Amino acid sequence: MAVLQAKQDALAARIAALSFADKGWLGAARKAALDRLAAMGLPGRRDEYWRYTDPAGLNAAEPAPAALFDPGAEPQLFDHMDRVKLVFVDGVFDPRASDDPRLAGVEIERLTEAGGRDAHWARGLYGVLEAQGQQPVARPHAALNSAFATEGVLIRVTGRAKKPVSLIYQRTSEGSDAILHHCIKLEPGAELTLLENGPAAARFNKVMEVEVADGARFHHIRGQGRDHQRQAVTHIFARLGRESLFKSFTLTANGRLTRNECVIELTGDDAVAHVACAAVGDGDFHHDDTVFITHGAERCESRQVFKKVLMNGATGVFQGKILVQPGAQKTDGYQLSQSLLLDEDSQFLAKPELEIYADDVKCSHGSTSGAIDDTALFYLQSRGVPKRVAQSLLVLAFLAESIAEIESEDLAEEIRLRLESWLHRHEH
Amino acid sequence: MKAAVVEEVDIREGVDRETIETVQAMAGKYKYGWETAIETEYAPKGLNEDIVRLISQKNGEPEWMTDWRLAAYRRWVQMEEPRWAMLHYPEIDYQDQYYYAKPKSMAVKPKSLDEVDPKLLATYEKLGIPLKEQALLAGVEAPEGERKVAVDAVFDSVSVGTTFKEELKKAGVIFCPISEAIRDYPELVKKYLGTVVPQSDNFFATLNSAVFSDGSFVYIPEGVRCPMELSTYFRINAENTGQFERTLIIADKKSYVSYLEGCTAPKRDTHQLHAAVVEIVVLEDAEVKYSTVQNWYPGDEEGRGGIYNFVTKRADCRGDRAKVMWTQVETGSAITWKYPSCILRGDDSQGEFYSIAIANNAQQADTGTKMVHLGKRTKSRIVSKGISAGRAQNTYRGLVSMHPKAKDSRNYTQCDSLLIGDKCGAHTVPYIEVRNNSSRVEHEATTSKVDEDQLFYCRSRGMDEEEAVALVVNGFCKEVLQALPMEFAMEAQSLVAISLEGSVG
């Protein structure tokens, strides 16, 4: 009882300064989310799901100040691409910096504009997948987001989008606390590439609910900015229909605290879900990937590829789970979590789980952790490659398997170059 | 194929008749479900400080031991039963059990095995555990002494007898019931008891600390290679009685011992509680092999009855180059909650864990290991094979932890699950914590079903489906079976076949 009380006290402090409009369909969804949240309270260190990550910074009433970061001459990610840009500054939508959101086969609206209406397609999605994702493990920060999100985009895709939609999260304040909530619905046969980049805020809480209908394809590539002191908790909740495809790749470089949760439910036969991440951290860096994939239909494929490069006391966490429900026969589930520890002080904490209730399945997971292979390093050096370069080569080779999850070769190349220059800057 | 196996056993070891029969019969029925009609003396039902004192008094313990138990009991009352395992069972009423049961004929402790109640001796004979040294010797064809096995037989709450005590004593080895050790070797017991599994370690270990009735005590002095394998055989007989045994093994510097443990219980409709603690202390350059074939009554097909098995087993490699190896075959019990662990404290120490867990019908097993690497260049290896059939749930839960100081350490983990039928479940919950970069940790897990091609091949050679499955499964388990001492390997192999009987199709 005392534990629950502490969680609820923490919640009361966290939401004291937050408020929401309770009009329209959105108001009803927010109220339901607030009820869910009140029953859970905020997570504590003793919760199994927060065993390796201290939620204190995310729970605190105020975000810890985060110094602004100057990326120097490096252009923003995806800068050269033809895309529809939607810009948020410290969590506030900036219409002047954003493009005209009209795109054939795609409807884009702002959450605050569409939320006040009586009826909207997003009503069937907002907070709905999040609520389902609260079982069997509570995700209080996602419920908090559904209750208090200040902005977001609602994207409905009916055809094949000609160019990507790009969400850009800029940060100008050392103390901003942003809560954004996006809903994305891909109708049968539709296709969309969604790009996300930028640090967003000193503390960023983001939820994205994605419904991928039968035969639809969704590609998601994000970069979480190079700010050192920012904190973020993000959730993706996705529901996949028959023969649909969901592919998500995340690049995380730096960040004091990042918790990326991904909750995917394969509900239609022959659906495919791939989730991948390349994370690189130096020093004050705590990166947590928490993934929960439920196979609820036959012949589905899921693939998780998580790679972390850690140095100078950085911490990497991976909690991944594949749940195969009764009857989800011919499931092909694969999960890989690996870390490369570049010095004595860094650490990797992993809990790769399988929970399987169907007999005709192929599920495997692998998890490894260790230093750079001395033999490989020696070999490269013996061929005249300087040690620093050899080390970077080996690190990039280690990360390659996750980058290979990006379908677009241009995007994969851009991510690879970013990682290369990051490694170059952090050579030691 | 089968005939060849039987012949081999006959040649190698005449005494292992029960195993042979088991293999031959492949009856799929629990063979040890009978009961010994014997008069039993119980302590009053329920648990309180008086019961704890009574158990202590029955064992003729000194005051320090009584106080130790009471401290554990007081702690236990404040603890909550853990619920994190993937196990579902109704609330256990800890007051609705007997915590002490002893055959009346044991009221006066027999001085030698000749004085032991013949009914008890017959019980162990029927179980295939010969307690008469002569009989055992006669049954062994191989002339070398190393095939001898010394047995401590525990019946409900008391040790019935220990064989080869004298011969072991000559080698300096102490092998006796722990109740006896508390009286005869208090210094050793005081020095080591509760140092590997502290009184307040966890709910079930704390309960055990308060009420443990008997168990085995082993001390191998410095430089001694134990001349024979030691074994303890646990038998639950009395109804509504919990069994709480405590085993303490100390391997002094440069010593070696191989220890076997077996257990069975009668068939009953009600569940029975078993909460054991095993503590192993391994000093410099010493090596301990601990093998278990756990075959408690698993309950019937509907899940009626069966043992609730909550066990804490831990080995502490205190000295440099100490080595411990756990091998377990878990086929029995309605509920298994068991994580034999290794604390690799000494530099260059090694821990190994080989496990086969088979769950059929309504059985649930949540088992695995912990490898805690503290010393430099420590090594551990985990091979776990889980097999689920019927409506059973089988979970591997394990921890591999590399502390910052455990430089250049190494772990390799492999957990494979096999599902037979579409109503069962197989789960893997590993925790991997790496806090230094010179260590390498590798974890692999797979889940699959019995390979159709392999089955087809076996069947095309004239095997029936059940035989074919048993063969394929034995192949799947080979790595673990090979780690078992010879006698156990045979028994385990046949148990694998038997536990899966009826799960095909």
Image (cartoon, coloured by chain):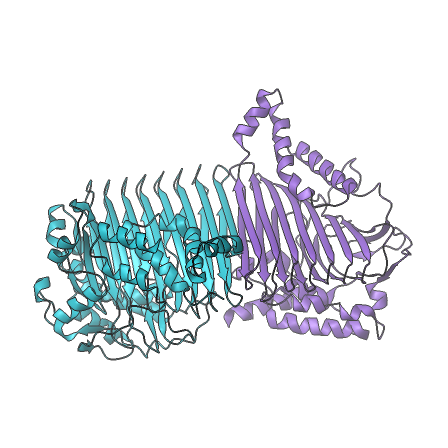
Rendered location of residue B318, percent (x, y):
31, 45
Observer able to see residue A177: no
Residue drawn at point x = 86 percent, y = 50 percent: A163
Q: Which of the two residues, B22 or B100, is positioned nearer the viewer here?
A: B22
Rendered location of residue B203, percent (x, y):
37, 66
The image quarter in which residue A299 lies: bottom right
Chain A colour is purple
Residue drawn at point x = 65 percent, y = 65 percent: A133
| Image side of residue B8 versus residue B377, left or right | left
Rendered location of residue B286, percent (x, y):
27, 42
Q: Which of the two residues, B404 or B381, is positioned nearer the viewer here?
A: B381
Q: How many labels, in total?
A: 0
**Image vertical order of residue B363 relative to residue A243, above or below:** below
Chain B colour is cyan
| Image side of residue A359 versus residue B189, left or right | right
Q: Which of the two residues, B76 or A129, is positioned nearer the viewer here?
A: A129
| Image side of residue A35 versus residue B170, left or right | right
Rendered location of residue A184, percent (x, y):
78, 61
Observer able to see residue A391: yes
| Image side of residue A131 versus residue B215, left or right | right
